Amino acid sequence: MIPVITLDGPGGSGKGTVSKLVAEKLGFHILDSGAIYRVLAYAALKRNVDFTDEEALCELARSLNLSFVPMEEGVSAVLDGVDISKEIRNETTGSNASRVAALPRVRAALLDRQRAFQQAPGLVGDGRDLGTVVFPEATLKIFLDASAEERARRRYLQQKSNGNPQPLEQILEEIRIRDDRDRNRPVAPLKPADDAVTVDTTSMTVPEVVSRILELAAGRNIAPL
Ligand code: C5P
């Protein structure tokens, strides 16, 4: 059985940064499942596919020519040979992603694509439903959380360092709307798996969160390189 560590949680809880560091320490592969939903929303917009047309979105989800390419600064999302990593990172795409992600058949169409990331020596995946739906047999399930205000603050600083800051109030509002949609959708809602360990990162530093997860992983016989 190839080990899988899942990190689920709301936007801005630190999943992306933490997964990358944990995967590096363990020498594991990485799955940013949110990026798949973001690419789908981006491609739908480009091709004029309506966000309510579930059939057309399913078709698009199945046919996406998408790959993730490891680069020095992280993993790049490449769609039809074009690196669209930057384009999918804005809040509009995040919000559109949460709209397409609320459609049950679209989620089903993306399951195999996500499960294919379970490759030796192991996988660290982050998202909303990796522990509950995509990898229910995962070796270790983490639910990362943080207050909405702290998550908005982190997003704000992230965008500022990318040279593209939005007002903090606006980010907080968008985070609240997206959380609400992700938590209350009928299919695969954002919630901790019954056997997940919740880590509240509101007042923790990134290295503290990484150590905590490595400690929990060691308890499941997953050791750093
Ligand atoms: O994590 P990220 O902000 O990139 O995710 C974008 C959106 O994709 C989320 O708001 C959520 O609606 C959706 N998503 C999901 N299931 C996942 C990962 C992301 O529904 N496993």
Image (cartoon, rainbow, N blue to C red):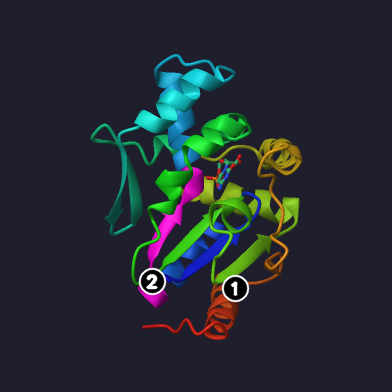
Q: Which residues are magenta?
A: 24-35
Image spot of residue 163 (x, y percent):
45, 43
Q: Along the line of sight, which residue is nearer the eye, 37 or 201?
A: 37
Are circles 2 and 1 on residues that touch, CB within 8 Å?
A: no
Residue behind mark 1:
209
Where is the C terminus found, in terms of image quarters? bottom left
Is any atom of residue 89 visible in this view? no
Where is the N terminus found, in terms of image quarters? bottom left
Q: Along the line of sight, which residue is nearer the eye, 219 or 146?
A: 219
Apparent side of residue 46 relative to residue 154 in the rendered image (left or right): left
**Does 156 appear above or below 146?**
above
Image spot of residue 7 (x, y percent):
57, 61
Q: Which residue sits at x=73%, y=44%?
A: 183
Determine crowd level at label 1: few under 14, some 14-19, many 20+ residues with C-alpha closer than 10 A: many
Q: Which residue sits at x=60%, y=51%?
A: 133
Q: Which residue lies most toward the front here?
A: 1
The amino acid marked with disc number 1 is Val
CA gap, disc 2 and disc 1: 14 Å
Ligand 1 quadrant in view: top right
Name the secondary structure under disc 1: helix
Image spot of residue 156 (x, y percent):
60, 47
Q: Along the line of sight, which residue is nearer the eye, 130 or 36?
A: 130
Image spot of residue 22 (x, y percent):
46, 71
The amino acid marked with disc number 2 is Glu
Apparent side of residue 168 relative to residue 19 in the rendered image (left or right): right
**Does 90 appear above or below 122?**
above
Residue behind mark 2:
24
Residue 29 shown in magenta: yes
